[in-house]
Amino acid sequence: MSGAFTKTMARNIFYGGSAFFFLLFLALTFDSMGQLPSRDNRAALSGPMGPQIAKGKMLWEENDCIGCHTLLGEGAYFAPELGNVYVRFGKSTDAIKGFIASRPANGIPGRRSMPQFNFNDEELTALAEFLKYVSEINSAGWPPNDQG
Amino acid sequence: MTYKSQSVAKLYFIAAIALFAAQILFGLILGLQYLIGDFLFPAIPFNVARMVHTNALIVWLLMAFMGASYYLVPEEAETELFAPWLATAMFWIFLLAAAATVAGYLLFSYSDLAALTMNELLPTMGREFLEQPTITKLGIVVVALAFLFNIGITILKGRKTVVNLVLLMGLTGLAVFFLFSFYNPTNLVLDKYYWWWVVHLWVEGVWELILGAILAFVLIKVTGVDREVIEKWLYIIIAMTLITGIVGTGHHFFWIGTPEYWQWWGSIFSALEPIPFFMMTVFAFNMVNKRRREHPNKAAVLWALGTAVMAFLGAGVWGFLHTLSPVNYYTHGSQITAAHGHMAFYGAYVMINLTIISYAMPLLRGRNAANSNKQQTLEMWSFWLMTISMVFITLFLTGAGILQVYLQRVAEAPQPFMAVQDQIALFYWLREIAGLIFLIGVVTYIASFFIGQDEPEVVLGES
Ligand code: HEM
Ligand code: HEM
Ligand SMILES: [Fe+2]
């Protein structure tokens, strides 16, 4: 870089630019937080199924489901997307419960296998309600189709 | 090595390399589980192997960053480290915490580990990359604070250079953004939104400051180019990093329930994120071309140039590939993401750490400037083995990703996820083979510390 452009100028661009764009990011975040209530399906969280959904999220986390699956496209790429599984399974929480409950303990020979978590019915309901809640978040039309 | 206290860096570097090897072994297990679905099932399910793979990566990169700091901060500040004993103590705490956490992953089911560590008191577990028990996370905060304190005081009491200042800003940012890992609301959109404040603002924000500072330090050392010139480059590179990378976080806010204007903000700003990586490449080659001296540590120069090129390819080119929202609509959460994740992490953060280790380890082990010819030859072999196999891993995953996206998301009759996976297995086999070669590279790398260590070091003008 030539002599006219000094280190001080570079430093000022760094501090000024970083501060400006960080503030812009905070402003956009502030605006997003204001818009989320109409998109993020929080009504479900305070509705009658709220406690189940919260429990379902806890179970989702404490069994590290994200270590194999994606949820709204984030996670691992070993097993199917679950953000829309409620839709893929014909909007049936029972179908979701049945699938999770029926995984063989020793896996399926030679195939990628989901563990048997031995959830009770209440836990299965919680997970299914959590996945239903996620499917009703406004994700701007993603995924492109039901296959996820 | 000019200051005695720099020697604590050695512990950190050794542990980092050991964890690197573990990371790669678990990567190979994962790659095999992709193909032989029930491999090690149910003893080590995929998700467990995956958290060992990714957490080992993160922890060894952090260890190496700390080692790098303990090495270069005293030298830049021209003073001994404030409290070497604290650095040693924190090393053992960090290592024990990491070992206990990995043992926990492997010995218990994850839900038992959650119960055992009382996750319900402050639930933070079970999110990608942040799988560590809450108690481990708190341990990381303690270690990070002690580390920042030690480094900060050393910088304050010594010579203040731009390299040290930028490094300190990067490390402080690393600790600050990690705090968002403790925020885990039931509202999934909020959870995801702030999860990215850890993950994205790390790798495309503050870590790049650390990367830039380490690269600048090594370039000053091996090229002898005037510090003023290098520092000016450093400032302008990190300026571009934060100007593009902060709002660039928006490329993760396309489809997670956030407002749709992020498709514009995220696409535009993240499309500019390759600029600082490109500048880094120009910078590194420029400095090496303008060098005032030949440095006998040829391997370190190779790593430095390699970092600049591979970070640009992995983060810049492979990042750009899927960062525009109309493209990301199809590629989001596919093997394309995995392809990019691998090359970006390797090219930027694995390689910069191997650069500083390559430069510093010979000095920490009592050499004047460099390793023996035999050691350097082996090390350069490992450079090419790892780097070329990573290029192939990336290419094979990209191939898998293109087919996956087409069959599952674009074709007229989209097929189910699992059906698609079966059809692209060939690419996963090729990836696994490339992974084995990567492992050979790691073994060669480790061998370079031992084979030829008894031979005299390379001296200028000789070899
Ligand atoms: C022997 C070589 C390797 C193999 C076979 C391998 C394999 C894998 C596999 C199968 C996954 C899981 C993908 C999924 O979620 O479905 C993964 C994830 C990951 N690996 Fe590796 N890996 C290797 C080396 C590396 C290296 C050298 C790095 C770092 C530089 C790395 C960083 C990562 C990261 C960051 C993820 C998470 C990716 C994401 O979420 O997009 N891996 N790896
Ligand atoms: C060294 C810097 C970088 C590293 C280490 C890195 C690493 C990663 C990783 C591991 C992921 C996957 C996260 C997950 O598991 O969900 C990811 C996602 C992504 N990265 Fe990067 N990245 C870097 C720089 C960049 C840059 C510069 C760009 C853009 C030009 C970019 C664009 C993206 C995009 C668009 C995604 C989301 C992919 C998806 O929708 O699935 N990255 N990155
Ligand atoms: Fe990002």
Image (cartoon, rainbow, N blue to C red):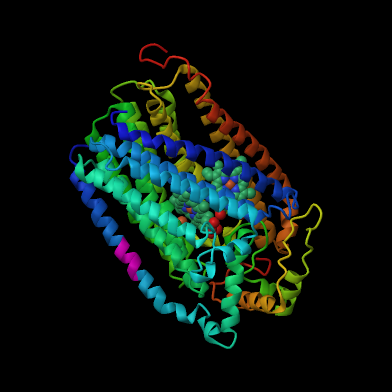
In this rendered view, identify the residue nearer to me: A104 or B138.
B138
- B63 in relation to A15, above or below: above
Q: Residue at x 20, y 40 (%)?
A: B158
Counting from the top left corner in percent of width and height, residue B165 is at 26, 46
* Figure quadrant of the C terminus of chain B: top left
- Magenta part of the chain: A22-27
Q: For this view, does B307 lie left or right of residue B431?
A: left
Counting from the top left corner in percent of width and height, residue A146 is at 67, 70
Q: For this view, does B178 lie left or right of residue B384?
A: left
Q: For this view, does B165 lie left or right of residue B122?
A: left
The answer to whether residue B423 shows anywhere in this view is: yes
Counting from the top left corner in percent of width and height, residue B27 is at 62, 45
In this rendered view, identify the residue nearer to me: B126 or B421.
B126
Hey, which quadrant is residue B304 in on the image?
Answer: top left
**Magenta stretch holds residue B14:** no
- B430 in relation to B416, above or below: above
In this rendered view, identify the residue nearer to me: B322 or A55.
A55
